[in-house]
Amino acid sequence: MSDSITITEAAQSHFVNLLEQQPEGTNIRVFVVNPGTQNAECGVSYCPVEAVEASDTELKFSGFSAYIDELSLPFLEDAEIDYVSDKMGSQLTLKAPNAKMRKVADDAPLIERVEYVIQTQVNPQLAGHGGHVNVVEVTEDGVAVVAFGGGCNGCSMVDVTLKEGIEKQLLEQFVGELTAVRDATEHNPGEHSYY
């Protein structure tokens, strides 16, 4: 599992420098707060010797180890920690594409795989507008029914976002499995508009 997290060389040397100023035996801990939710955040902290738990996973890097608690581990699949310098200064960047939802198997039910793509790829794009999408159901004929929430609710751009962006993206990823993506609000039984 040691390849689940990438810590770039720049980030590694940054950690080594930081740890030199800490008590001997201090390492780092990588964790996810609120894993599996929309508010998931990836974080890094110092990990003194006495804070290491038996259930932790240890990833050895040159000069230090990174410890990951059991709960965070599946949500840190494919995570990357980098140390980026630009004219504004230097900062650690943490990318954890699976923090909001653990990675699903390729043979998982279609609805789970669709939900995964929406949580990890679609929602981060909508987050800038304060909105998000959830999968309501996938019908037998391959229609993914999604519900918009947050800032997307009642937004006039929803149809465009859905057709241009989300449907296109999902249909490309699930060729032969999905046939269309529909907005649940258009299809609430009993709320049909009569003209």
Image (cartoon, grey):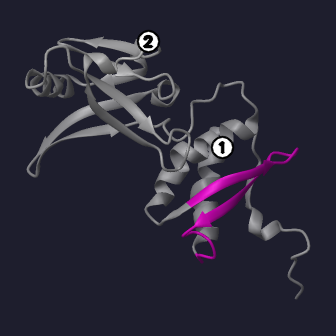
Quadrant containing the C terminus is: bottom right
Reading the image, the residue beneath label 2 is 54
Total numbered labels placed on residues in the image? 2
- Kind of residue indicated by mark 1: Glu
Q: Is 190 left or right of 117, judged from the image as shown?
A: right
Location of residue 69 with respect to 157 vertically, above or below: above
- Residue found at x 47% / y 59%: 127
Reading the image, the residue beneath label 1 is 115
Mark 2 residue crowding within 10 angstroms, few (<14) / some (14–19) / many (20+): few
Q: Position of residue 189 (x, y in %)?
A: 90, 68
Residue 70 is inside the magenta segment: no
Extreme residue toward the bottom, this view: 195
Image-quadrant location for residue 4: top left
Q: Is 191 left or right of 129, judged from the image as shown?
A: right
Image-quadrant location for residue 106: top right
- Residue found at x 21% / y 19%: 26
Residue 134 is inside the magenta segment: yes
- Residue found at x 61% / y 69%: 158
Q: Position of residue 86 (x, y in %)?
A: 12, 46
Tag shown at residue 105? none
Upstream in the sequence, badge 2 or badge 1?
Answer: 2
| SS label for mark 2 | loop
- Kind of residue indicated by mark 2: Ala
Location of residue 6 with respect to 100 vertically, above or below: above
Q: Position of residue 107 (x, y in %)?
A: 72, 24
Q: Is 135 left or right of 80, judged from the image as shown?
A: right
Q: Which residues are magenta?
A: 132-156
Task: Decide whether the magenta segment is chiefly helix, strand or loop.
Answer: strand
**Can residue 175 be seen from the camera position used here?**
no
